[in-house]
Each structure stands twice: as structure tokens, then as C-alpha cells.
Amino acid sequence: MKVWSREERYRALQDSDTEELERKHASLSHSIWRTQYHVQTLYGLLNDPDGFSFYNGKWHLFYQWFPFGAVHGLKYWYHVTSEDLLHWHNEGIGLRPDTWYDNKGCYSGSALVENDLCYLAYTGNNRDEKWIRHPYQMLAAMNSEGKIIKHDEPIIDPDPSYTEHQRDPKIFKREEDDMYYILLGAQSPDHKGHLIMYRSASIYEGWKKLGELKVRGYDSFGYMCECPDIEKIGDKYVLLFSPQGLEADGDRFRNKFNNVYLIGDLDLYHMEFIPDGEMKELDNGFDFYAAQCACQHKLRNTAVLEGWFGCADYTYEPTDEEGWSGLMTMPRLLTIENGKLLQKPVEETENLKKKKLFEAKKGSVVLDQMHALMPRAGVIEIDNADDNDFCFNLFTWGRDRGFEIAYHSAKKRLTIDKSSMRHITNAEFGTDRSITVENGLKHLQVFVDHSSVEIFVNNGEAVMSARIFPAKDETMIRMSGRDIDIRIYDANTANDDTFVL
């Protein structure tokens, strides 16, 4: 693999680079791992979702982008839009690192829609001549024509009480007091992760630090908190963030970095979040990080979430070698039912199901047009599994197990395992993940898209996501299990991969 110098990583994009990037983008059309219905990078590296919002009749999503290769470097915000959260269209670069305050990258942030504008709050990654980082919280505004103008000055300067790691502003407005708030991830000098809250009566100025948002029952969260978010669903708040440095606990927190949430109440008078229960992972699979909920009022009593289909400090050699890395997950609808957070695919994903390829009822095959061939992109639905063991092996060859999804009914345990695949990524963090399905497994939806698998358990009780890279000859599917219902569909194409810079 290529070793990148600092100069190469922090090379600014020029107009003269357009032809080179368009050529590199075109070369990816031959990749067997490019997806059909996920947001994916033009070329280079995609990571955190940013500025997610519903504005001017469309969903807007930005992602962190390094254009020249599958490594972290000088970050831009790339802009995509959708009318239905399924068909996404490339719009071009949204934010460029072109000021002194963001001279080494436009880092992650969020959106607030107000006064016919979509405001974008982000972290300007500034480095001085000694390469010392200075994080500034910046503001830009997008109008209905898609033009984005940056505010001249930072709205929040670096806080000397914390290290250089202060980033990822979540901006929101509370109806209760008509005030603006920013929740920020930070690291204290003793290397502990914290959440800081700011407030202002004006979006452009007057931001004052309220202090650290404490979470009752927790002293800190690893050595850094990234990408905080807070959403009100019904009469409850959901606090989401990505702590770095959590220790594994049985089946939990086994990834290098994890994305977590708590349900509870927000007490800003005492600067405290009071959780109703324990901290949980948003996703129990291998690859999920930096999730962000949209600023939106279109869908009531729910939040709409997007996540980076990856993880900080992970590598994905099969596509890295092709010069690109990174997807967004499918959008998820978040609701709270009986005190539990449910994450479901958005309704529009029903339109992904194209041709029915296979069906079994109570274990008996009634339709088979697959003949054991695994579709590169498809939707699998499984019902009535509770009292029955089953095993699905996707992208197998010969006696290999491929990507395995297995349910042990007596233990009520669902396991995914990638250890038998030809290309295994990030194996040092384990090749299997398991969850206990407390009330038994009733329904499973599996979305497969060339280099990704997303598994929704019991209509959103849990989600397990994985990046996989099946080789050209890993083409088969095997199924075993009694008395279960199975439907497998070929997936319709929803992705727009047009080159727009």
C-alpha cells in the first residue's frame, strides 16, 4: 500500500484536478464492491455524516471527504440530496477548507434549518506553522439555491480548559426558551472524554459556555467523545455520541470505537442528562460510527439517523487498494416504544425489492429462481424463527461458510461471523458479533449491497452492520432451518453515481 506524506495528505483540491478525479471515478465502475443503494464516495475517503437536514423540500446530507485516496487528509464536505431518503444525488463540494480557521480541514458538524436558511455548524481544523492544532467552531449558511456562505469569524474559540480535541458541534434550538444550543465533544487534559454545552440568543454571536453536560452514573466516556447528538422523541431525549477508548464488556463495545446512546431526560438547569437505563450500542455489528440525526420536522415523533458505515482507524484493504473507502449506512427511523429505542429502515426501502427470487413457507420451498446463487444486492426477510435454529451463509464457495448469520433458539442468540470470507478486514477486533434476543427472534430483515450487510432484528430492536468484500468466486448461498418463512428479493438500483465536483 502507498505511504502518504503529510504534503500529499494536505494537498488542496484545484480546478486542474477535476480531470484526474473524473478519470479515477470512472475507473471504479469496474469495482465489484461499488454499491447500488448506499451513498458512496466519488473517489478517495468518505467518513462522518454532516449537516443532515430536511430543507427546501429535500433531504440534504454532507459527508467528510478526502478526494485523492483512501486515507485521512485535508477534509471537505461533499453534498448529496434526496427526495425520499433512498435515491441520492451527487451535488458537489459543499464546504472547502479555504479560510485561516479551517486551513487543514472542515471537520464534522450539524445543521439547523431556520429563517429560510440551512445553517451549518462545523469545526474548523486549524494548524499553525508548528503544526499545533487549534479547533474553531464555525458557521455557514446555505440558501434555497444551494449557495453556501461562511460566517467570517468563529462562533466559538478553542477552550484552554481542554486539549486540542474539541469538535463536532451539534446545533439545535429549544422551543422551551427560544435559545440556541451547541453540544460539543471534548477531551480534558487528563485524557477523558466529555460533552460541553454552549448557549446563545443569536446564532451568529454571543455563545457562552454553560459547562459540561454530566450524565448521571457516568464520570467520563473513554478518552474522547466524538460526534454528539441529542434528539427529543415524544417526551424523552436520546443522547447519542461516539466515545473512544471504551473497554469491551462481553458482547458489547468490541469494536475499536463505538457509537452509543442513552434514553432519558435533559436537565439544563443542573447541566445533567438523567438516563432511564444503561448505555447501549446503536449498532451491534462491526462497522458503524459517528451517527447523526437530521434537523427535520417532516416526520413527527421520530428522528432520522445516518451513520458512517465504517469506523475511525479501520482500514478496508480491498477498496483501499482501488483508491476509495467509505459508505453511508441506510437511513434509519428512530422511535421510542415501551421505553425502548427502535431503529427501522425508512419506509421507502420497500421500493428496493425488485424481483422475488426465492420463497419458503414453514420450511418448504415454493419458489426458487436463485439456484443457490447469491445476489450481489438483495433483500432477505425471515419470519417465525423463534423456536427454530437457522443458519444463512452468504457469499460462500465450496465448503467455506462465507458471511454467516446464525440463530440459536435455545439461547436466543443471534451471531454474525465473517471469519470464513476470502477478504477479512480489521480481524484484530474479532470476526464475530453476537446479541441475545430477549423475547426471541420473530422477524429479520437483511439488506445486502455488494460490500455491505445490514441486519434489522425484530422490526428495529437491534441492528447489526458489516462491511464485507466477497471475492468474484464467492457466489453461492446456503440456508438451513425448519419451519421458517423466507423471502429473498433482487434489489432495485437506487444509487446515483454521477461524477459531480
Image: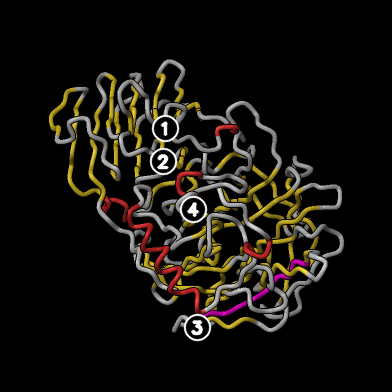
Q: Is residue 28 above or below residue 369?
A: below
User: Dividing the picture into quarters, in which one does residue 57 lie?
Assistant: bottom left
- Looking at the rendered structure, the kind of residue marked 2 is Phe
Give the label, 1 or 4, closer to the camera.
1
Magenta stretch: residue 136 in it?
yes
Residue appearing at x 58%, y 66% in the figure: 110
The mark closer to the camera, 3 or 1, is 1
If you read the primary sequence from the N terminus, does the residue marked by circle 1 or circle 4 appear first?
Answer: 4
Distance between the alpha carbons at the discs numbered 3 and 4 = 26 Å
- Cα separation between marks 4 and 2: 13 Å
- Choose the circle earlier in sequence order: 4 or 2: 4
Alpha carbon separation for disc pair 3 and 1: 45 Å
Q: Residue at x 83, y 58 (%)?
A: 162
Q: Which residue is mark 4?
A: 326
The residue lying at 69 percent from left, 73 percent from top is 103
Nearest to N terminus: mark 1 or mark 2: 1
Q: The residue under label 3 is which amino acid type?
A: Lys
Residue behind mark 1? 422
Q: Label 2, label 3: how many angstroms apart (C-alpha)?
A: 38 Å
Residue 236 visible in the current orientation = no
The residue to which callout 2 is attached is: 469
Residue stretch in magenta: 134-142
Expressed as whole percent of the image width and height from the top left, the position of residue 172 reads: 61, 67
Residue drawn at (68%, 61%), measured in percent from left and top?
6
Q: Is residue 115 above or below residue 87?
A: below
The answer to whether marks 1 and 2 mark residues whose Cβ atoms lie closer than 8 Å is yes
Q: Nearer the viewer, residue 391 or 219?
A: 391
Q: For marks 1 and 2, give the CA distance.
A: 8 Å
Residue 345 visible to an observer of this rendering: yes
Q: Are marks 3 and 1 in contact (CB under 8 Å)?
A: no
Instruction: Check if residue 2 falls in the magenta segment.
Output: no
Q: Which residue is mark 3?
A: 147
